[in-house]
Image: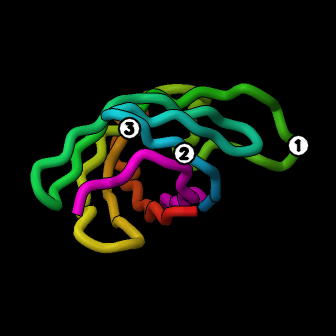
Amino acid sequence: MALENGLYKVAFQTPLGEGYGVAVIRDGRIEGGDSMMYYRGTFQEDGDAFTANVEIGTHSQVPGMGSVFGVPEGSIELTGDTGRMPATMKGSSPQAPGIGFQATLSAL
């Protein structure tokens, strides 16, 4: 099942914290954000297998809030399964070695 173009809810976590945001999926691109961070990148699907490279960065300083990677900007390399919803993904950031990332993507 391929991801359809549209708006998705993203729930994510690392050992440093968790968060929620939205992402727009359109023709192999991902763009979105949350209260503090933006996300943008590209993805590919091969059957139910999903791979992506997503750039992240801080757009606003929010008191008491921090990046789940502990860095203000970077990239996330993701792999996942889009065979059913919510889609599940795992990844890491070269800018935050050793910090695993998990996410789910649900259609809105």
Image position of 85 with respect to 29: above or below: below
Q: Amino acid at mark 3?
A: Ile
Image position of 106 with respect to 26: above or below: below
Label located before the other in sequence (2 or 3): 2
User: Label 3: how many residues lie within 10 Å, few (<14), some (14-19) or many (20+)?
Assistant: many
| Residue depicted at x 49% and y 65% | 106
The front one of 9 and 67 is 9
Q: Residue furthest left?
A: 46
The percent coordinates of residue 48 (x first, y second) are: 16, 61
User: Label 1: how many residues lie within 10 Å, few (<14), some (14-19) or many (20+)?
Assistant: few
Q: How many marks?
A: 3
Q: Which residues are magenta?
A: 1-17
- Say which quadrant the C terminus sits in: bottom right
SS for callout 1: loop
Q: Are marks 3 and 1 in contact (CB under 8 Å)?
A: no
Q: Nearer the viewer, mark 3 or mark 1?
A: 3
| Residue depicted at x 44% and y 42% | 25
The percent coordinates of residue 1 (x first, y second) are: 22, 63
Task: List the residue tagged with mark 1.
Answer: 63
Q: Are marks 2 and 3 in contact (CB under 8 Å)?
A: no
Image position of 88 with respect to 94: above or below: below
SS for callout 3: strand
Task: List the residue tagged with mark 3.
Answer: 76
Label located before the other in sequence (3 or 1): 1
Q: Which mark is residue 23?
A: 2
